[in-house]
Amino acid sequence: MTPTLVRNLRDADPSAPADAGTRARDWAEIQERMLAPLYEAVYDRLEVGAATRMLSLGCGSGLALLIAAARGAQVTGVDSDRERLALARARLLPDEGAEGAPAQRARLHESGLPSGAVADGAPYDLITVFEPIGCAAGDSEGLLPALEAALPLAARGATVVLTGWGPPERCATAPVLRVAARLTESARPPRPGGWRPTLRDDLEDVAARTGLKPDGSGRVSCPFGYADQESAVRGLLSTGLFDAAVRATDRSQVEKEVAEALHPYRRPDGTVWMPNVFRYLVCTT
């Protein structure tokens, strides 16, 4: 775990109000690190290093970018969440704007894609989508326009990595996520965007619809481990997978029912542990 992330975790404030900024910090300080094994597995397989020019779609608060930059890669991140992007900027560009600051190790963009490629003008040879799809209705549809817009910025034969949740039977978090589906469906009329089980070919479907050629895949164990039940609830709600349920009911009810669903995964010492498997698909342009 990086020193920056350790420092951010230590500074977490559990009493902070549940506003957009706090939710982004919950993601950065509690939840995002759960996917670090996925980032590392992909980077090891692709030998990400100093020769890599990477564009990350949905970069969030920047942990995947930070790990790639530590390997020497030139990284660019794009995200529509302003609060998460601000945290990514603090992690990756702490001296931005300061007199005598070193050259930027990364570039970050809100919403729209950069007009050019990396700083030296070369196209990207790696595009990553580390926000896992296949767990919310319509999430692959939302990915398609961003991916189609990004592909012209890639070199011929560039690598594109798509990620998704593994089979529900391999993800202990799946029963907890079903709370979101049940609460969303309880609304009249039902609210869109609720949880749904992962389908076997979610990633392959996105690849086919964007003209990408699959070139291998893998599965990575990413257990969700939390210091206590409160941290687990905050971390899970920061993913956005419970947003439709919150709109259909209210946040306090969602928090209560998620806490109840976590009981089978609580250990005697109060920690929460949920084994999960995530899948990635390696494609070429």
Image (spheres, grey):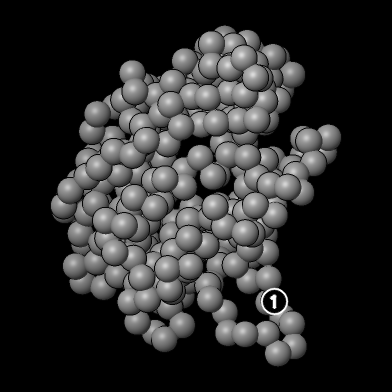
Q: Where residue 176 sits in the image (x, y, percent)?
A: 52, 18
Q: How many marks?
A: 1
**Is residue 197 depicted above or below 42 in this figure?**
above
Residue sitting at 41 percent across and 72 percent down? 73
Q: Where residue 113 sits in the image (x, y, percent)?
A: 47, 66
119 relative position to 87: left or right = left
Q: Counting other residues with Cα less than 10 Å from the Cα at mark 1, is it few (<14), some (14-19), or many (20 or more)?
A: some
Q: Where residue 25 sits in the image (x, y, percent)?
A: 69, 46
40 relative position to 185: left or right = left
Answer yes or no: is residue 250 visible.
no
Residue sitting at 42 percent across and 36 percent down? 222
Q: Nearer the viewer, residue 166 or 158?
A: 166
Q: Give the amino acid at mark 1.
A: Asp
Q: Nearer the viewer, residue 21 or 236?
A: 236
Answer yes or no: is residue 268 visible.
yes
Residue that carries the numbered disc 1 in the rendered image: 95
**Is residue 3 depicted above or below 32 in this figure?**
below
> Dividing the image into 4 quarters, which one contains the C terminus?
bottom left
Secondary structure under the numbered disc 1 in the rendered image: loop
Residue sitting at 42 percent across and 68 percent down? 71
Give the residue furthest to the bottom.
Answer: 100
Q: Quadrant of residue 4?
A: bottom right
Q: Where residue 260 sits in the image (x, y, percent)?
A: 63, 10
